[in-house]
Each structure stands twice: as structure tokens, then as C-alpha cells.
Amino acid sequence: AQSVTQLDSHVSVSEGTPVLLRCNYSSSYSPSLFWYVQHPNKGLQLLLKYTSAATLVKGINGFEAEFKKSETSFHLTKPSAHMSDAAEYFCVVSGYGMRFGAGTRLTVKP
Amino acid sequence: DTGVSQDPRHKITKRGQNVTFRCDPISEHNRLYWYRQTLGQGPEFLTYFQNEAQLEKSRLLSDRFSAERPKGSFSTLEIQRTEQGDSAMYLCASSTGQFEGGYTFGSGTRLTVV
């Protein structure tokens, strides 16, 4: 069975500093992995996806994630946080029905 | 608008009443999914359809819950004899059926059981 674990429930950064949101996955086969973002009172939006091509995946709004099979990780990063990045972020593994992590709330301080 | 539509956006109901939600997926998507999201949690998978066939149901989907997709287009999720624990955001998503594609989510239906 596939699952993901988001290692931090809350991350706080200052505007202009790097963002790191951590995700470990468990899968019995080579997974497809995704990051979604959910802004308050908004729907879920796909940030990026890994589907066994390049291990470094670039997404929207300057985010990227690196698939590391040896570490079973798929961490989300951004070089410089913006106030508009404040949201809930979900790491997701595919299967018959995508399985979501519990989420990481990102706070960006001015 | 070619996105996933859900109706209603909000529903307040008394405990014990039945409620039904509707989801209209992207027209060319043959897969449709229902999720439930409670405050502070990630979405939890409930069930999914490929065309009109319901292919998987989570153990979270008790016998009070039923979902249909009669013509392989829109879907309905019904909750009978609602309980306060059913209060949540119910999300619908659709996809082309390729795991690699990711899903397109609707804005959800927020259910409050009082």
C-alpha cells in the first residue's frame, strides 16, 4: 500500500528566505508523487508531479521537488518565499485513489 | 468553465437528515473521485469511479454513504441519517485515468451537521 508522511505539520519562514517542506513516501512499486497547495477557502491546486522521468521536478510559482529513491523522499523547496506562498501543502502518492499526507502549513513572516 | 463543479458549496443540515451532493467532472475525464477533508487534515479517499463503474470504496465509506455515477458523467454522494461526525468538506476530483496526470479538484461542498 502507498502512503506519505509529511514530517512537519507547520513551517514558518521569513519572506525572501528558502522554503523546505519534507515528505517521505512508502510504496510497493515505483510511485507517482505530487505536491498540492490549498489556500484558505480555495480548492486544491497541483504544484508539481513526479512520474519517473527527471528526478528534479519543477512546478509552478518557483517551487521544485527532488525524488530520492534511496531516501524515499520527495521534499518540496523554493529558493525565496513570498507572502503569497502562505498556505497548506500536501504531499500525495498515486494509486487507485491518491493518498494525501496530513499537510504542512506554511507561514511566511514579513 | 471547464473545471470540476460541485454543488452546493455549503450545506447545513440537522442530525438524522439525508443530504446529497453533486459533482460535475471535466467532460473528457473518465475517472471521478470523492474525498473527505476535516479541519487540519489532508483529504481522505472515499471512493472512485471509472466511467459508471465504482471501482474502489474506502472503509471510511460506511453503509450510510452511497455514491453513484449513473451515466459516467456527473456523480452524486448521498449521506443518510447524518451524524455530527460527518461534518467536513467533501471534495470531488476527476482525471483522465492516467496516474501520472494528477487530479483536478472541485472547490468542495462544506457540510455542517447541527
Image (cartoon, rainbow, N blue to C red):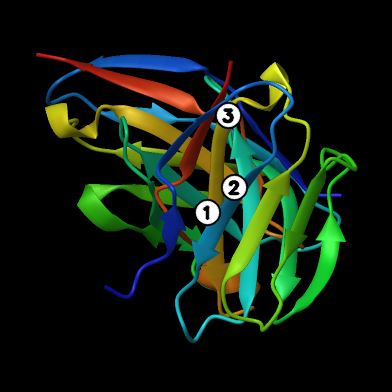
Q: Are marks 2 and 1 in contact (CB under 8 Å)?
A: yes
Q: Quote the CA–CA distance across marks 2 and 1.
A: 5 Å
Disc sitting over residue B88 in the figure: 3
- In the rendered view, would you say A20 is above or below A77? above
Residue type, mark 2 in image: Val
Task: Work out whether residue A72 or residue B49 is closer to the camera in this orientation and state it.
Answer: B49
Q: Are marks 3 and 2 in contact (CB under 8 Å)?
A: no
The answer, for residue A92, to whether it is visible in the render is yes
- Residue at the image position 49 percent from the left and 71 percent from the top: B25
Kindly identify which chain the residue marked by label 2 belongs to: A
Residue type, mark 1 in image: Phe
Residue under label 2: A92
- In the rendered view, would you say A99 is above or below B27? above
Kindly identify which chain the residue marked by label 1 belongs to: A
SS under mark 1: strand
Residue type, mark 3 in image: Ala
Residue under label 1: A34
Q: Quote the CA–CA distance across marks 3 and 2.
A: 20 Å
Q: Quote the CA–CA distance across marks 3 and 1.
A: 23 Å
User: What quarter of the picture does the N terminus of chain B occupy?
Assistant: bottom left
- Residue at the image position 62 percent from the left and 35 percent from the top: A101
- Residue at the image position 53 percent from the left and 21 percent from the top: B39
Q: Which circle's residue, 2 or 1, is located before the other in the chain?
A: 1
